[in-house]
Image (tube, grey):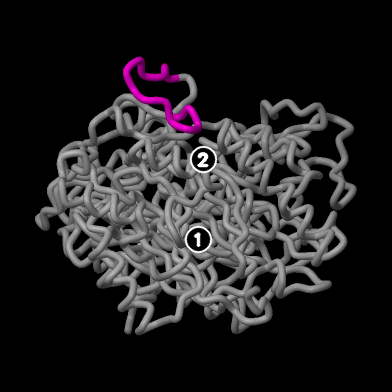
């Protein structure tokens, strides 16, 4: 029996792709250099796709099954996306998974605990929709999960980044897949394991390692790469169902081999504290994701295919307390928050909630089962009721007591503001609204733009600083072009990679940059300095492509609204026309333009930087904001660029695949100006 008080050394590898003798020789060298290892985990294809036509590979497999080929470390093999020879499944079924000395086949899905106490959840194959018909000519998989076509495997698998080099095509009959029923069963197993772990040692969550062939959708972003590599990562496919699985069971490590490339993401935490043991205790918890390259036949040269680590099993390190709570200093927010937001460790108490959400995990507008709580709206979603971002229209704070949107700017007769107990304005427009510390903390925890909120939408994040972050705009006015540097625009297609329509958002809940610019605290000064630094950096990027920024902040000075600065690139040649177009639009809407903020400290405003001379212009927003188009800044940019048909952001929304591709192109172009990457 292993010493459970000592961390176990574990070696994890991607797809082996045959040449078993050569592979185990490499493992021996790694064991001598980094070991000795207690466990070897293979999270990809053991054999190559040409196995049936490869005499050497078949001879090596026979030697393996006869124990003539030595397996130096206790090895557990997950089935990748290619079916293994039937005799391996038959042999494993007769010998409790063992196919030779020191090697166990983990077909299908399940939970395994090693002799070292390491608890492993695993699921092999690629995800396919259960609605697709099973192939008529394919062999039956041990789990009845064989797909028959490339289209079947692609179903419900999200491609975050388009690529000109598609994944290699495999013969249809050898595909291995799983469906939602498999995930449901695995989550149920993990819930039971967590329950047993808590009763025994109070460890929750209890899964040390999750092995899947599919990568989880949503984990890839250059700024989260642990090596600091700014190059955009291109993935062939990533499964949102695997994202749901990982987010629900919260493993300490998650390994995938399906992309055939190495990627070590910065660890993420689920929140500062998660509830465990029926809510009796709370502890911080984090996950590390590592994608692994292939040992042989790699589509990408020199991809790292192994990962060595020391694992202290969660089942044994807690001993009477919640799971370890010391999170790494480089932890990021949870990138998979949309797919599993239980608020506590998975157990029988919230199992029903988790399973009910499984088919709702595809979109960012899925509702949680608990109290009908909605996931956050995407960045730049604008409520049709109040024309403000940060909440869905169903949750709009400007709705009256009967939950119907207002039809004008004035409350009905007899309405009394619940903030100041006076009439004449809505509670949301109260000029004396200053939240107390308790309500402010609650507000920030629920605000979809505050990074303090563990549920904040990170789908379009481009860079994160100390005081503010940069995100791409949803339904961007300008789309990315070919990257030419002469400032040419073709309709709404601009020269800047990724388009360049970005948001600069304070990390801490801020309802107005005016308050910060007029404040004298160190925090105010730091925020303003970093916002200006982001503006300068993005301006340099725009200049590289012959563009200048139209920069504006639309602010209502309301405590529930999180302010932001928008930047939209326009050709340098059009900078001189900004002032005249702005004046014409203001005259048509009966609005005034001035050189200063409006007089009242709680008065709303639209602040615009004139790119011709970098002067700041201010348009007061009437308190009855229903008479003011809160998308005025975007409308101005649309008229400057000659694309008035793109004034409405909702008409410009593209798929998440395209959004992610545009984001990654922008990140790559912006890397040299991103001051957070210095050094």
Task: Give the crowd class for mark 2: few <14, some 14-19, many >=20 residues within 10 Å.
Answer: some
Q: Which residue is mark 2?
A: 93
Sequence-first disc among 2 and 1: 2
Please give the name of the residue rendered at 67% of the width and 36% of the height, measured from the top-left corner.
355
Identified at 30% across, 60% down, the residue is: 293
**Quarter occupied by the C terminus:** bottom left
The answer to whether residue 223 is above or below residue 622 is below
Whether residue 153 sits left or right of residue 605 in the image: it is: left
Q: Which residues are magenta?
A: 132-145
Disc number lying in front (2 or 1): 2
Q: Position of residue 335 (x, y in %)?
A: 52, 55
Q: Position of residue 35 (x, y in %)?
A: 43, 81
Q: Is residue 277 left or right of residue 21?
A: right
Q: Is residue 87 above or below residue 96?
A: above
- Between 601 and 260, the residue placed more toward the observer is 260
Q: Which residue is mark 1?
A: 505
């Amino acid at each position: 029996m292993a010493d459970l008080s000592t961390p176990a050394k574990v070696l994890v590898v991607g797809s082996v792709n045959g040449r078993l003798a050569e592979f185990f020789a490499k493992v021996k060298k790694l064991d001598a250099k980094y070991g000795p290892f207690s466990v070897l985990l293979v999270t990809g294809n053991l054999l190559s796709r040409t196995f049936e036509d490869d005499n050497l590979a078949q001879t090596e497999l026979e030697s393996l099954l006869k124990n003539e080929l030595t397996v130096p470390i206790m090895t557990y093999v997950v089935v990748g996306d290619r079916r293994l020879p039937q005799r391996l499944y038959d042999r494993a079924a007769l010998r409790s998974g063992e196919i030779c000395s020191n090697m166990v086949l983990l077909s299908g899905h399940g939970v395994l605990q090693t002799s070292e106490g390491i608890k492993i959840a695993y699921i092999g194959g690629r995800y396919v929709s259960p609605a697709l018909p099973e192939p008529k000519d394919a062999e039956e998989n041990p789990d009845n999960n064989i797909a028959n076509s490339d289209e079947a495997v692609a179903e419900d698998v999200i491609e975050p980044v388009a690529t000109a080099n598609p994944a290699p095509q495999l013969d249809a009959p050898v595909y291995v897949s799983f469906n939602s029923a498999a995930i449901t069963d695995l989550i149920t197993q993990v819930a039971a394991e967590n329950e047993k772990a808590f009763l025994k040692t109070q460890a929750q969550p209890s899964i040390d390692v999750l092995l899947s062939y599919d990568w989880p959708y949503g984990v890839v972003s250059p700024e989260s790469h642990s090596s600091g590599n700014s190059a955009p990562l291109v993935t062939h496919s990533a499964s949102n169902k695997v994202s749901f699985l990982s987010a629900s069971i919260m493993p300490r490590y998650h390994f995938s081999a399906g992309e055939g490339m190495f990627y070590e993401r910065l660890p993420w935490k689920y929140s500062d504290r998660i509830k465990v043991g029926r809510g009796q205790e709370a502890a911080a918890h984090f996950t590390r994701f590592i994608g692994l390259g292939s040992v042989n036949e790699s589509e990408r040269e020199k991809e790292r295919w192994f990962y060595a680590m020391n694992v202290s099993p969660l089942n044994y390190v807690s001993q009477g307390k919640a799971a370890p709570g010391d999170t790494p200093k480089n932890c990021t927010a949870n990138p998979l928050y949309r797919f599993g937001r239980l608020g506590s460790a998975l157990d029988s108490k919230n199992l029903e909630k988790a399973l009910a959400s499984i088919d709702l995990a595809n979109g960012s507008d899925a509702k949680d089962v608990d109290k009908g709580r909605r996931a956050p709206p995407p960045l730049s979603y604008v409520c049709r009721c109040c024309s403000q971002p940060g909440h869905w229209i169903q949750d709009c704070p400007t709705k009256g007591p009967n939950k119907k949107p207002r039809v004008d700017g004035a409350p009905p007769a007899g309405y009394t503001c619940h903030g100041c107990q006076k009439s004449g304005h809505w509670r949301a427009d109260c000029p004396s609204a200053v939240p107390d510390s308790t309500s402010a903390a609650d507000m920030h925890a629920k605000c979809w733009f505050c990074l303090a909120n563990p549920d904040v939408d990170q789908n379009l994040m481009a860079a994160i600083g100390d005081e503010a972050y940069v995100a791409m705009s949803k339904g961007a006015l300008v789309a990315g072009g070919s990257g030419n540097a002469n400032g040419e625009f073709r309709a709404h297609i601009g020269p800047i990679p990724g388009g360049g329509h970005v948001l600069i958002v304070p990390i801490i809940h801020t309802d107005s940059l005016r308050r910060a610019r007029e404040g004298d605290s160190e925090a105010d000064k730091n925020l303003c300095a970093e916002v200006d630094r982001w503006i300068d950096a993005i301006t340099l990027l725009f200049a590289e492509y012959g563009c200048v920024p139209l920069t504006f902040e639309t602010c209502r000075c309301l405590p529930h609204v999180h302010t932001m600065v928008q930047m939209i690139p326009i050709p340098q040649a059009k900078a001189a026309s900004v002032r005249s177009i702005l004046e014409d639009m203001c005259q048509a809407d009966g609005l005034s333009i001035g050189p200063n903020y409006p007089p009242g400290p709680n008065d709303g405003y639209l602040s615009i930087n004139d790119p011709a001379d970098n002067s700041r212009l201010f348009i007061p927003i009437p308190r009855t904001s229903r008479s003011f188009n809160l998308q005025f800044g975007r409308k101005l940019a649309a008229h400057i660029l000659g694309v008035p048909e793109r004034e409405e952001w909702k008409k410009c929304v593209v798929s998440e695949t395209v959004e992610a591709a545009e984001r990654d192109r922008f990140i790559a172009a912006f890397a040299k100006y991103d001051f957070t990457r210095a050094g």
